[in-house]
Image: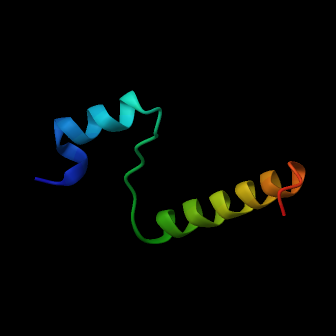
Amino acid sequence: MKGDEEPEFVEFMENNGLGLVITDGDDFSQLMDDDFEFYGELITDLELD
């Protein structure tokens, strides 16, 4: 059984407001690139850099 199929894990993610995205390969790389850009801009906008 995969970790993302464990009811306790899914419940933990939902209860803590965390998203659950299951992906691999090119999709995962794109997700990381998008998040890096988003949080980089957020840090700059909040003047935390």
Q: Residue furthest left?
A: 1
The structure's colour scheme is: rainbow
Count of numbered circles in the view: 0
Q: Is residue 17 left or right of residue 41?
A: left
Residue at (88%, 50%) from the top-left corner?
A: 45
Q: Residue furthest top?
A: 15
Q: Is residue 37 left or right of residue 41?
A: left
Q: Is residue 18 above or below residue 3?
A: above
Q: Is residue 24 left or right of residue 28?
A: left
Residue at (40%, 58%) from the top-left corner?
A: 23
- Residue 48 in percent (x, y) is at 83, 57
- Residue 37 in percent (x, y) is at 74, 62
- Residue 46 in percent (x, y) is at 86, 48
Q: Is residue 45 above or below residue 36?
A: above
Task: Say which quarter of the image contains residue 14.
Answer: top left
Residue at (37%, 28%) from the top-left corner?
A: 15
Task: Say which quarter of the image contains residue 12.
Answer: top left
Q: Residue furthest front?
A: 48
- Residue 28 in percent (x, y) is at 48, 64
Residue at (66%, 59%) from the top-left corner?
A: 34
Q: Is residue 43 left or right of residue 35?
A: right
Which residue is more in the foreground, 36 or 45?
45
Of the 4 image quadrants, the one containing the C terminus is bottom right
Q: Is residue 48 above or below residue 9?
A: below
